[in-house]
Amino acid sequence: MIEILSAFGLSAATGLNAYLPLLIVGLLARFTDLVTLKSPWNTLENPWVLGVLVVLLAIEMTVDKIPAVDTVNDAIQTFIRPAAGAILFAASANVITEVSPTLALICGLLAAGGIHAAKTAARPVITASTMGVANPVVSVAEDVVSATTTVVAIVLPVLAAAFVLCLLALFGWWAWRRRRKRSTS
């Protein structure tokens, strides 16, 4: 059960930043005993894969802080983040033989896709309401949350699951307030 919670935390983290959780898991699998990846997921440990992830992470972290460009990046990432979440969920759940690989991929896809959808809906509103001034701050916060969720999902998976649920509840509350404010205007 702990592995499933860890898998959900890892895949949810990719909804905010696709490459950071992949890089963290790859580095931890390569240099520590905290993460053990079975084939074919152990490809994340390959130095070439890690190098590509570093480059992609640098690009994403840069463009995600620029107003309007971040929206284009989110559109492109609509396909990448859920796929990354599916990969991390399947790689984490691969430790448990009872979990179907197809089910693991679907769960990761949905967890990452849900977080990505919330981010994609919120960012244009933040950009418009702050005229883009808050974009770098929000982007850094998303990166910190993604990295923290990834590490916590590996070290303390139950805490990571609670954190993801709190984030979803916070977004739901924000969306509800926004709709309520619109209906009273």
Image (cartoon, rainbow, N blue to C red):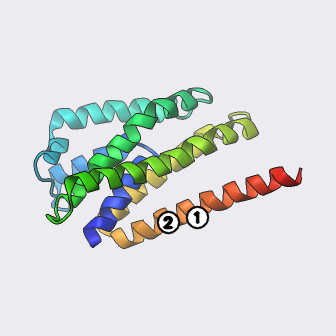
- In the rendering, at what x and y percent does residue 27 appear? 23, 48
Q: What residue sits 28% from the left and 50% below the top?
A: 105
- In the rendering, at what x and y percent does residue 16 appear? 47, 46
**What is the three-letter code of the residue carrying label 2?**
Leu
Count of numbered labels shown in the rendering? 2
Q: Quadrant of the N terminus?
A: bottom left
In the current view of this chain or complex, which residue is farthest to the left? 39
Q: What residue sits 48% from the left and 51% below the top?
A: 114
Disc number placed over residue 165 in the picture, else none: 2
Task: Assign a secondary structure to mark 1.
Answer: helix
Question: 16 above or below 150?
Answer: above
The residue beneath circle 1 is 169
- Within 10 Å of the Cα at label 2, are there few (<14), some (14-19), or many (20+) other Cα atoms? some
Task: Assign a secondary structure to mark 2.
Answer: helix
Q: Is residue 109 left or right of residue 126?
A: left
**What is the three-letter code of the residue carrying label 1?**
Ala
Q: Quadrant of residue 78?
A: top left
Pointers 1 and 2 in contact (C-beta within 8 Å):
yes
Q: CA distance from mark 1 to mark 2?
A: 6 Å
